Image (spheres, rainbow, N blue to C red):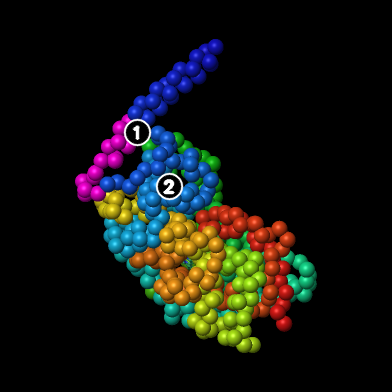
Amino acid sequence: MMMIMDVGSLIAVVALGLVSLSFWWFILRVRCHKKTSSGLPPPPEIPGLPVLGNLLQLKEKKPYRTFTKWAEKYGPVYSIKTGSTKLVVLNSNDAAKEAMVTRFSSISTRKLSNAIKILTNDKNIVAMTDYGEFHKMVKRHILTSTLGPNAQKRHRVHRDTMMNIISEQLQYYVKKDPNGAVNLRQLFQRELFGLALKQVLGKEVESLYVEELGTTLSRQEILEILVIEPMKGAIEVDWRDFLPYLKWIPNRTFKINIQRMYFRRQSVMTALIKEQKERISRGEEINCYLDYLLNEAKSLSEQQVLMLLWEAIIESSDTTLVTTEWAMYELAKDPQRQDRLYQDIRNVCGNEKVAEEKLCELPYLSAVFHETLRKYSPAPIVPLRYVHEDTEVGGYHIPAGTEIAINIFGCNMDKKQWENPEDWKPERFIDDKYDLMDLHKTMAFGAGKRVCAGALQAILISCTAIGRLVQEFEWSLHHGEQDNVDTLGLTTHKLHPMKAKIKPRN
Ligand code: HEM
């Protein structure tokens, strides 16, 4: 009886609380619709619940799709509430560019989720740090040593080796089992990870003894710890992100999970760096990011160096894979377009293998790559930006303290910009009515001062890979693969790896 009484009064208190919250929420909404100090109106608000705001409408982990649906009803710029945080969502090219370029000086910082804050050691990587002196310095380092045009020329040999290994492995698979299905992701991910290790540490690693973990890890286990686990960790939700005034309530499962990832990543990176420092002390210098940072960036702490090296490994190993796999999925599904690409390659390359210097002569290949970026942007939402001084976007007033989500996926599904945006149609980039600049219209690499540092590497690897895979094999989807298009994760991985049948062309 006592128990029932308690529950009854609890319900009454909660109900009263909700009624009064709803009242204040209503008053606030009405106030928000008034003009602001700048004279501009605030963006329209998506109706939600008191306290939780729109959180329950975003339960599934694909907010970019929900944002896009809302844009159809409420227009390209609107605001939502994720708990106590106000988030303005931008779904049009004009608004996105305005935020990334014209208004950048007011929107150049980030507020990170608890998971990303821990995993990035509190903004200690290029992609997550606030814009400022540190950002400029570390971006310069990664471009000079690894990702800029001259550095990419120096690392060319690693990319060519990688492509030859992938091609040989595929030949081997078909010989062994001509009717079997190949899992391109598994092979490509392994080799891309190897390339990242060579660029970053100077050497590939087949196994590694990690003192803190008391065990020897295989290359696959190292990949899991450095890339796959943190990618999953980055989208772990800590409900305290949305209700920071409740941060005093512990969230043990979340904390244990992320701290375990952090510890394992830290231990593996420390062991990898130790091995390479021993190499350097033997007098063996290699052209790689680690050697560069030790020589040229003496002001950085050991932990900062570790974080920057890890960043280059994780970023090299994921997004390029996502794009290449989706492109091959679309081509395997579409024999006519695959044939068009094959004929183009034959005309330009003859019996020579597709190589980087031929890419500029293969506009259809470039169109395939950019159309894949458009339909399957690996980063569908640009990492959230934070408004640190009052500003405006799309003709709306955006007060300091607001977060900004640039929904690249939404921009690329905008019917005003793209004809039948749901269709994968590379021709849209080469038909007469489009011009070359349209390639940048997808904004898949971001824009402005925070534009992706690895765009050149991603283009070189992905385009050469797609070109060679189509030049050397005929691709078709394995039975049942047609509708297998769901996505997963921080970057839009195909939910299930593509299973394809391949037939050598010669
Ligand atoms: C298809 C492949 C890729 C796509 C679509 C992509 C996309 C993006 C996007 C959208 C951003 C955020 C821009 C912003 O915050 O405004 C970004 C930043 C960044 N990306 Fe990429 N990326 C790709 C490949 C790579 C690769 C291969 C690397 C390096 C190994 C890389 C390194 C970086 C870095 C360092 C930043 C931070 C730049 C800054 O904050 O100034 N990316 N990328």
Q: Looking at the image, which residue is at 45% across and 35% down? A: 249
Q: Which residue is outermost to the top?
A: 1
Q: Which residue is mark 2?
A: 73
Indicate whether 494 appears above or below 256. below
Quarter of the displayed picture in which ligand 1 can be seen: bottom left
374 sits to left or right of 179: left
Examine the rendered structure and indicate whether residue 442 appears above or below residue 77. below
Residue 468 belongs to the span the image colors magenta: no
Residue type pointed to by label 1: Trp
Front one among 429 and 477:
429
Q: Quadrant of residue 424?
A: bottom right
User: Foreground mark, 1 or 2?
Assistant: 2
Write down the region rendered in magenta: 24-40
Mark 2 closeness class: few <14, some 14–19, many ≥20 residues within 10 Å? few
Q: Residue at 32%, 60% (x, y): give it.
A: 98
Say which amino acid is labelled 2: Lys
Q: Is residue 23 left or right of residue 7?
A: left
Residue 232 shows up from this direction: yes
- In the picture, the disc for residue 25 is 1
